[in-house]
Image (cartoon, rainbow, N blue to C red):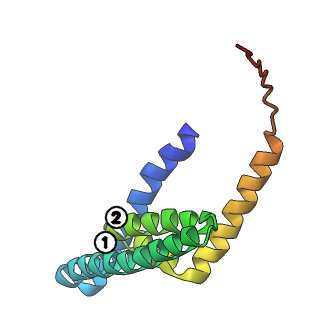
């Protein structure tokens, strides 16, 4: 796990820096900065809209007595998208915008559910409880 995180925190920033330098050499410094700031602002706004929509759906499900499990996963993915979109970079913006699209989130949500279900089946355990009744 440590090795994966180390790779994530070194390869992703280096790739982002390389992409920004390449885009900067084509567009120029000013347009590249405008692109980074613009995608951050637009992405934060879109993440906010999707977040409010998901919150309303969660409240509706709770009102109807339905557990909002899918909406909780959506909320986590939208939060992740927002974090990626306010992080300067081309690659993180692409991933962040794709997470804001409902079809992409639905596919990722299915994968997360399958993985959680498999994990729950693999780590099934039994809890034994002893109940002692007192009669006073």
Q: Nearer the viewer, residue 85 or 52?
A: 52
Q: Residue furthest front?
A: 136
| Residue 93 place in picture, x, y as percent | 40, 74
- Is 3 on the left-hand or right-hand side of 48? right
Q: Residue furthest top?
A: 136
- Is 17 on the left-hand or right-hand side of 3? left
Residue underneath mark 1: 21
Q: Nearer the viewer, residue 44 or 10?
A: 44
Q: Residue at x 70, y 69 (%)?
A: 110
| Residue 32 place in picture, x, y as percent | 25, 80
Please rate how many residues cluster around mark 1, counting C-alpha atoms within 10 Å: few if below 14, some from 14 to 19, many from 20: some
Residue underneath mark 2: 17
| Residue 54 place in picture, x, y as percent | 48, 74
| Residue 108 place in picture, x, y as percent | 63, 69
Q: Nearer the viewer, residue 85 or 14?
A: 85
Are the residues tagged 2 and 1 within 8 Å (C-beta)?
yes
For the N terminus, the image quarter is: top right
Please, is residue 7 above or below residue 47 in the view?
Answer: above
For the C terminus, the image quarter is: top right
Q: Quadrant of residue 35?
A: bottom left
Q: Residue at x 44, y 71 (%)?
A: 91
Q: Secondary structure at mark 1?
A: helix
Q: How many marks?
A: 2
Q: Secondary structure at mark 2?
A: helix
Q: Residue at x 67, y 61 (%)?
A: 112
């Amino acid at each position: 796990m440590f090795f994966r995180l180390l790779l994530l925190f070194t390869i992703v920033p280096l790739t982002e820096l390389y992409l920004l330098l390449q885009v900067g050499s084509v567009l120029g410094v000013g347009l590249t900065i405008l692109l980074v700031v613009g995608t951050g602002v637009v992405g934060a706004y879109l993440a906010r809209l999707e977040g409010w929509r998901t919150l309303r759906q969660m409240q509706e499900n709770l009102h109807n007595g339905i557990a909002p499990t899918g909406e909780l996963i959506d909320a986590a993915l939208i939060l992740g998208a927002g974090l990626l979109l306010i992080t300067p970079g081309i690659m993180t913006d692409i991933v962040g915008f794709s997470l804001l699209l409902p079809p992409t989130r639905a596919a990722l949500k299915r994968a997360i559910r399958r993985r959680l279900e498999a994990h729950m089946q693999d780590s099934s355990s039994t809890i034994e409880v002893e109940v002692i009744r007192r009669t006073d």
